[in-house]
Amino acid sequence: MENLAFIPSPSSGVVYLGPVPLRGYAFCIIIGVFVAVWLGNKRWVARGGQKGTVADIAVWAVPFGLVGGRLYHVITDYELYFGDGRNWVNAFKIWEGGLGIWGAIALGAVGAWIGCHRRGIPLPAWADALAPGIALAQACGRWGNWFNQELYGRATDLPWAVKISATDQHPAGTYHPTFLYESLWCVGVALLVIWADRRFGLGHGRAFALYVASYCVGRFWIEYMRVDDTHHVLGLRLNCWTAVVVFIGAVVCMVLSAKWHPGVETIVEPAAAGAAVNLEKDAAGGDAEDTAAGDTEAPVASGSTRSDAKNDDAEASKSS
């Protein structure tokens, strides 16, 4: 019996504005980037940073992330681009789909580190501010797979199944919309990180680690549902194993961070100096006590301590 209720797929993933092609996959990624930067900026400012810093660092992180995501896809699915009957030039056609989130996050972090280093701010603090925004960016980006009719699950007659045209591997029919499942899961991850950060004060990379760990949980079962061709290891899809390994790494990072760096850092970027100061809020609330005691000293450059600044002032008074 034919499924009468389903999600239709676009007949084409490209819309032409005159001679200019607007590709749905690229459009979804661009929207995701804007959402991530917008939310990341709000969270960064709330933590004491300046407006515009998140966008400045994203200029480094986004290109690195795109390259990393494409590299991961091409390496893990090399048979699609190399070998008999394949055109290696297609490996550069990123608009046709094929970005691995694992490679995007890994190489994107390298770009973010460069940007943070240039601004003199700690990468973990920037990653914490951006974490829920990245999850929302993924939620937006997954709809690009809908435009390309890719990354769907097993055949189903559920009313929210997605209609897929015939391919070399599968006949036309209705399939589990795994792109939708992952999009909704990523929205839930973003909300979880925002709630947990407000409730527990996740600093020093713990908010980002929570995003990674919770995303991996969803990615494992969603990946298990997919039917597109991929490499398998011990009966499991390669990305399922990647999700397990990355999940363990994220949990370990959360535990070690909580042990070594309790509390939340507040990032202050003095406009005059253009530098950043990492002021620790330890469990005893030392900063609050300093403020209550009338400590109104101006922030010093990143990497310096308040005692160093006082000593420098004392020496300057003596010499004068």
Image (cartoon, grey):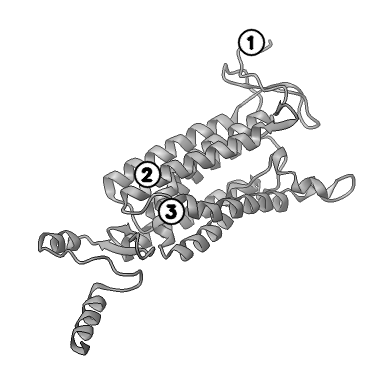
Which circle, 2 or 3, is nearer the viewer?
3
Q: Name the residue tied to disc 3.
A: 53
SS at mark 2?
helix
Q: CA distance from mark 2 to mark 3?
A: 11 Å
SS at mark 1?
loop
Say which of 78 and 233 sits in front: 78
- What residue appears at the point 43 percent right and 50 percent down from the top-left corner? 52
Q: Name the residue tied to disc 2.
A: 42
- For this orientation, the residue located farthest to the bottom is 319
Q: Quadrant of the N terminus?
A: top right
Identify whether 257 is placed above or below 12: below
Q: CA distance from mark 1 to mark 3?
A: 50 Å
Q: Name the residue tied to disc 1.
A: 4
Q: Is residue 131 left or right of residue 154?
A: left
Inspect the image, locate mark 1, and give the three-letter code of the amino acid beneath it: Leu
- What residue appears at the point 22 percent right and 86 percent down from the top-left corner? 315
Inspect the image, locate mark 3, and give the three-letter code of the amino acid beneath it: Thr
